[in-house]
Image (tube, rainbow, N blue to C red):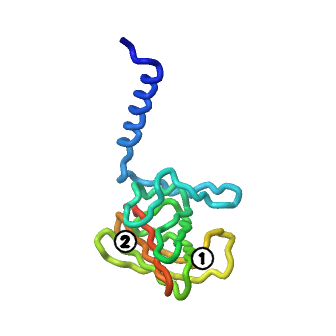
Amino acid sequence: MPLPRFANRIWWLGLISAIAMTGCDSTREIASEPLPQTSGQRQATQSSAPPTGSVCPPTAQYTSQDLQGTGDGATLWAMLFSTALRTGTEIKVVWRMTGSGDFSISATGPDGKAVKPVWGPEPHGGSNWNRPGDEWGTGWVFPTPGCWTINATRTSGTGSLVLRVAQ
């Protein structure tokens, strides 16, 4: 006896979902072209969960240049000036963080080694990037591929963001 019409559609939907979920490869190479901008605003959404906390995102090819981290007593936002993160290549990142007091930032790599930005943080006096908090610019060169946890600290509040860097 054939399946009712709606059951057949549910079966196909389940099969397509299973293929889509298993077809992702987290080690693939990434493209280096920048994201298109819409109406002067950077896109604030990603096709998958944003890289926050201690979970490493599935790919280094971000679908957004505007990423939200996690915070304790503060909010942390990053604006990547490229969606392709590769070892040995400098990337500019602008940060917005709430809280008060001095701002410091470092990154810890997959091997536990900590690095500082190659330049910055430089405070920014004015900006059209609409996120809460004060703004700083930094430049980064990640020496090894893998998951890098960025830790930002102010006198009141901390924040972190995890980025995957490709070879």
User: Residue 48, labelled with which disc?
Assistant: none
Q: CA distance from mark 1 to mark 2?
A: 29 Å
Q: Which type of secondary structure does the marked residue at label 1 adopt?
A: loop
- The residue shown at (44%, 64%) is 52
| Residue 143 disc label | 2
Image coords of residue 165 (percent x, y): 40, 63
Q: Residue at x 36, y 48 (%)?
A: 25
Total marks drawn?
Answer: 2
Label 2 crowd (10 A; few <14 / some 14-19 / many >=20):
some
List x then y, in percent, for residue 141: 43, 73
Q: Nearer the viewer, residue 46 or 148?
A: 46
Helix, strand, or loop for circle 2? loop
Would residue 126 be found to the left or right of residue 25 on screen?
right
Q: Amino acid at mark 1?
A: Gly
Amino acid type at image mark 2: Pro
Where residue 137 sits in the image (x, y, percent)? 56, 77
Residue at (52%, 72%) from the top-left corner? 76
Residue 43, position as x, y percentages in the image: 60, 57
Residue designated by label 1: 133
**The C terminus - image quarter:** bottom left
147 relative to 130 in the view: left or right: left
The image quadrant where one finds the N terminus is top left
- Give the quarter of the image for residue 166: bottom left
Q: Residue furthest top?
A: 1
**Lower sequence index among marks 1 and 2:** 1
Place residue 106 in its image quadrant: bottom left
Callout 1 environment at 10 Å: few (<14), some (14 to 19), or many (20+)? some
Tag in front: 1 or 2: 1
* Residue at 60% from the left image edge and 76% from the top image edge: 133
